[in-house]
Image (spheres, rainbow, N blue to C red):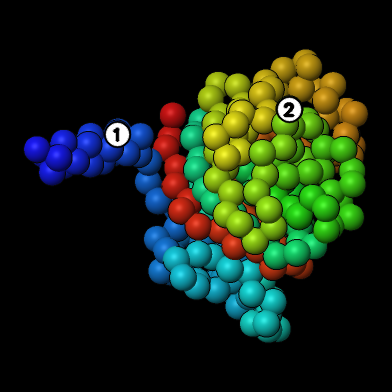
Amino acid sequence: MKKIFLSAYILLSLTQISKAQKGFKPLFDGKTTTGWHTYNKTTVGSAWQVQDGALHLDLATKGKDGGGDLVTDKEYGDFHLKYEWKVAPKANSGLIFYVHEEPKYHATYSTGLEMQVIDNDGHPDGKITKHRAGDLYDLVKSSSEPVKAVGEWNKAEIISKKGKLKLILNGVEVVKTTLWDDNWKKIVAGSKFATWENWGTFKTGKIALQDHGDEVWYKNISIKEL
């Protein structure tokens, strides 16, 4: 009888997982960099290595072609993104979205918004308000800090639909705001991006993993278009 109940429980759990993942498509297959390229280039920088099912910015393999920010080949509008990240001590990175790829913009952050990925206590940026893990970088401070210890995996989500944006870290909603309205313009005006041409205005764009010169890992990256 216990075996029957256990089997039923496992089946129910698998069904729930299947429903939760319905409509999500992997952006990273865990084996290759297919579907990604370095920003404003056609290839992937040598520092980005696929190791143990994760994309690892491995500084030991950073050759002449470097690393650079990775971006998706495809653009996205309304979406629900899920991913996991961890950082080495004193490291800084970020998941950047609504990135407009064009040579006139020298970096992914020239146009895109960022959910911060960082060692809060080890990197100097962690001492700055709105620059800590889970923050909407330089724009909106997280309502709480459910970030894991350095070296542990964090689960993050970004949900953007019809201008309504939510950032979730380890199951906790940490940021909620509205994009592109008058209040958004005020938020941007009070940030480092205030005078940046077209920053934060694109309603479709690519998703980027930032090379900030520090060691970082990303895995289980999937997206559902809404």
Occupied quadrant, residue 211: bottom right
Query: Quick one: SS at disc 2?
Result: loop
The one of 176 and 188 positioned closer to us in this rendering = 176
- The quadrant in which residue 39 appears is bottom right
Q: How far apart are marks 2 and 1 (CA)?
A: 29 Å
Q: Give the residue drawn at x 82%, y 37%.
A: 130
* Image quarter in which the C terminus is found: top left
Q: Is residue 69 above or below residue 224?
A: below
Residue that label 2 marks: 143
Dot 1 alpha-carbon crowd within 10 angstroms: few under 14, some 14 to 19, many 20 or more: few
Quarter of the image with the N terminus is: top left
- List x then y, in percent, for residue 154: 59, 49
Q: How many marks?
A: 2
On screen, residue 142 versus residue 193, left or right, reads left
Residue 82 percent location from the top left of the image = 50, 43
Residue 14 rendering spot, x and y as whole percentages: 26, 41
Q: Which of 72 and 151 is in front in this view?
A: 151
Can residue 41 be seen here?
no
Q: In this view, does 223 lie to the left or right of 172?
A: left
Q: State the residue lying farthest toward the front.
A: 1
Amino acid type, residue under disc 2 in the picture: Ser
Q: Position of residue 104 (x, y in %)?
A: 75, 53
- Location of residue 185 with respect to 86 vertically, above or below: above
Which of 16 and 158 lies nearest the eye of the viewer? 16
Q: Which of 48 and 16 is in front in this view?
A: 16
What's under tag 1, amino acid-wise? Gln
Could you classify mark 2 by the number of other residues whose Cα lies within 10 Å: few (under 14), some (14-19), or many (20 or more)?
Answer: few
Task: Tell me what residue is drawn at x 40 percent, y 60 percent.
Answer: 29
Residue at the (78%, 44%) spot, across then down = 132
Residue that numbered label 1 is attached to: 16
